Image: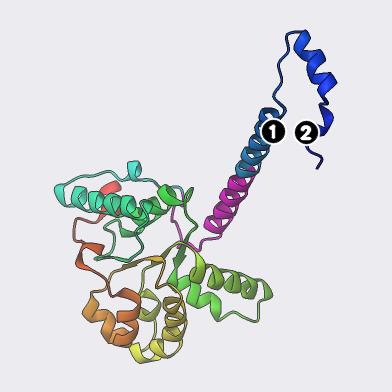
Amino acid sequence: MQNFNNFLDKKMIEHLRKKGIHIDPNSVEQDRDKRMHDADLKATRAYMKNNRNIIFNNSLFGNGEDINKCFDDFNVTDDKQNSELEQVISITKRIENGEKHKFIFYGKPGTGKTMLAISLLNKLKDKYSCLFVDIARFIELTKNFNDERAKLQVNSLYKAMRNVDVLVIDDLGSESSMQRSASEASTYNQRILFNIAQSRDDKTTIITTNNTGAELKRIYNPKLVSKLMYTASNNVISFNSSDYRLLKN
């Protein structure tokens, strides 16, 4: 692109000056460059945000899960629920500020673990690439490779699970509960989970589970549990409040 000074020769500048119009060619060019830079930056941000939305919308949710849930939708009924909500909000702020850890939400079914994990992602998805995966559905999907559409979905999810900034693996352990034995589940499921865990050391992973650590070590190889879930105590939330689903009805 030609320099702006080439278009404003001395005679033209002097002519405009006599008419009371003062132009600094360098300043005009700088202003133009800044506008172009700002427009490029805006377009890039819009593109990245659109990509993040596409990734999140390709999440694999369980039946009946509302992907639009936010923290305001969590109706607190007792002190335990309030404490759990506040802990998840605190973790969300830590992730928002750049912390990268493994986080564990564990406890009995129906206490709001999944809903709050979805709320966390909805809070972060404008800033980070986020993905939610119901692990039982994902494992089942991997077994349907005769279906070309399922194969494409699995490959896309598998790549995203290894690369997104924030990943929620929902209901870990549930994919093994319908097997005849824990060892049967571990042979196939552990290989998938370990490959995912291997690529997430420098990223944020949130795991929800109805199982305790001891129970998971009976289901999976302890080395996998350590790789997938080893973290500081302040990254673990125990959900032991009342059944949230019953209280809503």
Q: Residue at x 18, y 61 (%)?
A: 240
* Residues rendered magenta in the picture: 43-67
Q: Which amino acid, by three-letter code, is at mark 2?
A: Phe
* Residue 151 left/right relative to 68: right
18 is higher (above) or lower (below) than 245:
above
Residue 225 horizontal/vertical position (percent): 31, 80
Q: Do the residues labelled 1 and 2 touch (CB within 8 Å)?
A: yes
Q: Looking at the image, which is closer to me, 203 or 71?
A: 203
Question: Quadrant location of the N terminus?
Answer: top right
Q: Tell me the colour scheme of the image.
A: rainbow
Q: Is residue 44 magenta?
A: yes
Q: Looking at the image, which is closer to me, 24 or 45?
A: 24
Say few, some or many: other residues with alpha carbon within 10 Å of mark 1 (under 14 / 14 to 19 / 20 or more). few
Residue 91 horizontal/vertical position (percent): 29, 55
Q: Which amino acid, by three-letter code, is at mark 1?
A: Arg
Q: Residue at x 36, y 63 (%)?
A: 100
Q: Which of marks 1 and 2 is in front?
A: 2
> Main SS of the magenta segment?
helix
Q: Earlier in the sequence, mark 1 or mark 2?
A: 2
Q: Does the magenta stretch include residue 66?
A: yes
**Disc 1 from disc 2: Cα separation:** 10 Å
Give the quarter of the image for residue 114: bottom left
* Residue 84 left/right relative to 180: left
Q: Mark 2 points at which residue?
A: 4
> Can residue 188 be seen here?
yes
* Residue 22 left/right relative to 214: right
Q: Which residue is drawn at 64% across and 41% down?
A: 37
Q: Looking at the image, which is closer to me, 231 or 134?
A: 231
Q: Mark 1 points at which residue?
A: 32
Q: Give SS at disc 2.
A: helix
